[in-house]
Image (spheres, grey):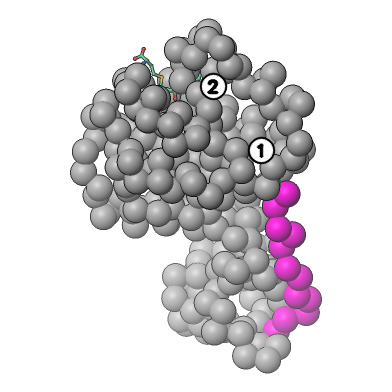
Amino acid sequence: MHQFFIEPEAVRGDTVLITGAEAHHLRTVLRLAAGDRVRLFDGTGRILEAVVTRVSKGETETRIVACTTAEPPPVQVHIGQAQLKGKKMDLLVQKANELGIQTLMPFVSARCEVRTGNPERQERWERIVFESCKQCGRAVPMACPPETDFAGMLAAGCEFDLKLIFWEEERQRSLGPLLAPMAPVHTAMALIGPEGGFTEEEVTQATAAGFLPVSIGRRILRAETASLAAMAILQHRFGNLD
Ligand code: SAH
């Protein structure tokens, strides 16, 4: 069933008006007509099933036939990702949303080669998340806050049950043996470095802030590979990717 995003205010009783780009997509691209069923998300977790009652230029009227609420995830996994070059962040934003990550927080660290928080990039990420939600049926979009610095990233970590910093030079603590006996956590945060990795000083600072340095093996993964692996491992371990 095709899915569309609506503003919460678009719901009036059992009628929902789809407008703007979503209405255009529905009418011109997908060529839906009266009688077709659609699924509507308002971004809060509410999922409406509706039937199209009228299609006109610029807006489509639908009537709600069922309303459900998306189940809250068993764990909230947040990823702090050092800014990467080129289109790698775009890829991570899309994949993180598909994998059910709660927030992807971009930050700048000592060895980042990308330095400026570009407002266009922020808007592009919001669009990517939105398109991804439509593709994968996610009802509550992943959050992508504005870029912060490394200190800001560490400070943002204070509220999480499990805090990890992925470090390829860690030799004492491997992720598998750490997670295996662990009781379920409600919130987890993982930091992934830039292409050049974290400095030792950053790892020391993160440790002082309560992050556990972890390795996921002797192979050095590219930053985006490490990030996707971290997402999948944590989500799977705590029941959000079964
Ligand atoms: N400093 C390295 C590569 C950094 S890899 C170099 O230039 O050779 C980029 C990021 O991916 C790292 O900061 C780390 O967060 C993560 N990463 C890659 N391989 C990893 C591994 N085996 N264990 C844990 N984290 C890893």
Residue 214: image tag: 2
Q: Residue at x 21, y 44 (%)?
A: 116
Earlier-in-chain disc, 1 versus 2: 2
Under circle 1, the secondary element is helix
In the picture as drawn, the residue positioned furthest to the left comes out as 116
Under circle 2, the secondary element is strand
Q: Quadrant of residue 115?
A: top left
The one nearer the camera, 230 or 127, is: 230
Q: Position of residue 108 (x, y in %)?
A: 29, 38
Q: Can you tell me whether the CB of the residue at mark 2 lies under 8 Å from the nearest atom of ligand 1?
A: yes
Left or right, 183 with respect to 204, comes to: right
Q: Residue at x 27, y 54 (%)?
A: 120
The one nearer the camera, 19 or 31, is: 19
Q: Which residue is mark 1?
A: 235
* Amino acid residing under circle 2: Val
Q: Is residue 77 visible?
A: no
Q: Which residues, given as a range, are shown in magenta?
A: 63-74
In the picture as drawn, the residue positioned furthest to the front comes out as 208
Q: Position of residue 86 (x, y in %)?
A: 30, 34
| 27 is higher (above) or lower (below) than 127 | below
Label 1: few (<14), some (14–19) or many (≥20) C-alpha neighbours in 10 Å = many
Left or right, 50 with respect to 85, comes to: right
Image quadrant for the N terminus? bottom right
| 211 is higher (above) or lower (below) than 63 | above
Q: Quarter containing ligand 1?
A: top left
Q: Residue at x 68, y 91 (%)?
A: 13
Q: CA distance from mark 1 to mark 2?
A: 16 Å
